[in-house]
Amino acid sequence: MKIENLSKTYRAKGAPPVQALRNVSFSLPEKGMVFLLGRSGSGKSTLLHILSGLENFDEGDIIYRGSRFSAFSERDRDKYRNNCCGIIFQDYSLITELTVGENIALALRLQGERDTDARVRRALDQVGLSGCEKRRVTQLSGGQKQRVAIARALVKSPRILFADEPTGALDEQTGRDILMLLKELSKERLVFVVSHDRAFAETFGDRIIELSDGSIVSDSAPAAHEEAPEPLPDLPARLPLATALKLGCNNLLRHPVRLVFTFLLSFLSLAFIGISVTAATFNEVDAYVNALYDQNAELTAVYRYETYENGYGPGGTIDSMLGLPDPDHPISITTSDIGRLEATVGTPVAPVFVTDLSSIQTNFSVSSAQELVNRINAAVSSDPDDHYDFTPNGYLQIDEELLQFLGYRLTGTLPATTDEIAIPDCLLNAFKVLGLRENGTDYPISCAEDIIGHTIRLEFVLGNVITGQTQPRTITGVIDTGCGISCKGSHAVYQGGLNSIIGGEHYHDLLFVCEGYLPEYSYAVVTLPDDRPTRTELVKLAANSSDGQEFLRLSNSFSSDFRDACMYAALLQNLCLYLCAVFLIFAFLLLINFISASVHDKLQQMGILYALGAGFRENVKIYTGSALLIGAALFLLSSAFMPLYVSLANAFIASYVPAAPALFSVTFWPFAAVFAIALAATFLGSFLAMLRYRRRAPAEIIRMGQS
């Protein structure tokens, strides 16, 4: 090793610069014991730190086997410390979290060695500490700690041993024993010792160099032969993950109260982030599909609505209060809509025209409305399993495909022209009780065949407007919907705003007509498919149908409450959007601050690892691994409470809309968000905490840890 014009100046903020070394030049042999003497402040430790790669220099250069320190990258310096030199510190600089054997084995494992036990025992034998592998560092005397430090430096067979005041904290006899050991080791390698004891230097040294005020004032043997050029060993440091985790966890557990406090606050922050992401990722389509399943819905009505400009009807909110058209105004559904619905669900769609056909009562063989009521009541009392309907509520367009799909039984034929109709079995039951009056003649009705071919007159009613027109319609068939009194209203579909309930699978209060009977219809009834993808496509069809003036809307027993609940879901989304950002920043800062404090508490340990050859990545691994364990624990705990987060979000909606279906459900995204945030916060916390020390020399980091 050749040192050329080496200079080093320390510059501290607010203090004058101190020049530690001034144009120092000398050469060192490949083996032997060289002492560096000088008073305190003469630059001895600075020179040793520079030669061992622990400190940077300002001017000059060092040539080691043909390699110049000035050309070293950060990685080269790590390889030099890891493979070429061993360092013995005055204060031992052992890692108290590791046993004696683990401290020594660490130097080997940084070189990628796995089978270290035999070499550790051999190193302990060399320093006279056989059998001490399992002992704690804190159980050793000062002389024993120094021997462990020597064994740690020696175990990787370095070409140079640097010893900084190895006897400074020892009694005279122990110090003499240590120097005798180093003298023996110097037969095979260079041992460079910094000391203040001239007597020891003259007794054990092969060469004595003396410094004063940063300059060499004497050198007992200045000549040294040239070293043959040789590249640095390409063995980058590799800190085992198990060792890194052990060190990291011990470091984090150094302040358990602070750890628990940080963990709880971080958990609360992540919990709120989980709620926020649940709200932020709320999807009306998915929520509506889930509600269809939760409510066991089998049918849904589809309406077309007209949206007035600015969301108001022709007369504004006063009209709504008076029961006039709402801002979302239902209009006729089109044949095009029906075609799109059928193409989406893949099954027939039933278009319905809602009206009040009260004039059908004139077709019964009764003299008064009271007689009609009395006969029906008597029939219901005698046979409660049958259902009687004498006021149809509209028309259902039907064909053979829809009939087969619904599974209804037909007596007679389906209507083929607009002059024909088919009636449901519940209306046939009414005719059985009340009789049929046709053109002034009364006919008893006892079965479906008795009424087929007869003509009844319907008074056409649109909304509440009676047209005054009677239209004769020939009955071509009777459709058995299988509906009795016990199922009236079951599987019902609620038509919002029209107060109309139809028997979901039975259409028991509608007249059956052919295609083209009416030019338009009030709504369509869709049988919900069982599979989720098709249901989703149906809901998407309605959700994406708006053209700015009109839109489709699904309407059923819960849709009105669902729409109200969605307004509060939007409110929750907006609220969480801002609070989530606050809690996200809070969680990041909390974890980063905790990890930074943990790193700062263990700066000396970090400096020791650098001195042993560990690079920046290996030091980051210590805190990153343990921090990621915290992040994983936070994720698992938060995930366990995820259903609670979802229930809290649904409870918020239910507090305003009690009858609303549950909108929020446990999905992938809250888990993913909490996982990403927990791990990102802990990883960045450890990385950023370490980054601030990356450009500092190992010796400086050790000094910071000692202060």
Image (cartoon, grey):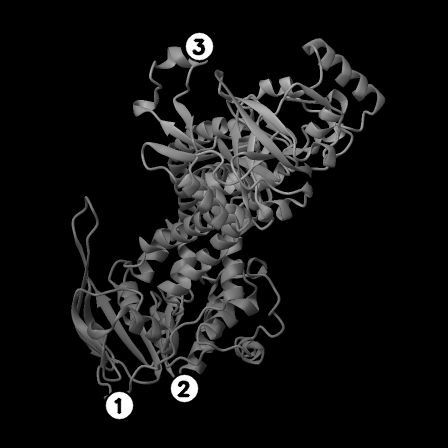
With respect to residue 619, does 361 lie above or below?
A: above
Contact, mark 2 vs mark 3 (Cβ under 8 Å): no
Tell me where residue 43 sits by quadrant: bottom left
Query: How many residues crowd mark 1 within 10 Å: few (<14), some (14–19), many (20+)?
Result: few
Examine the rendering and report whether any part of residue 15 can be seen. yes
Query: How many residues crowd mark 2 within 10 Å: few (<14), some (14–19), many (20+)?
Result: some
Inter-mark Cα distance, 2 to 1: 17 Å
Q: Residue at x 27, y 59 (%)?
A: 695
Contact, mark 2 vs mark 1 (Cβ under 8 Å): no
Inter-mark Cα distance, 1 to 3: 104 Å
Q: In the image, is 595 to the left or to the right of 529?
A: left
Quadrant where the image shows the N terminus: bottom left
Residue designated by label 2 = 188
First in residue order: circle 2 vs circle 1 = 2
First in residue order: circle 1 vs circle 3 = 1
Which structural element holds mark 3? loop
State the image coordinates of residue 241 (x, y, percent, origin top left): 50, 66
Query: Which mark is drawn over residue 322?
Result: 3
In-front residue for pair 401/586: 401
With respect to residue 125, does 547 lie above or below?
A: above
State the image coordinates of residue 451 (x, y, percent, origin top left): 70, 32
Question: Disc 3 residue type?
Answer: Leu
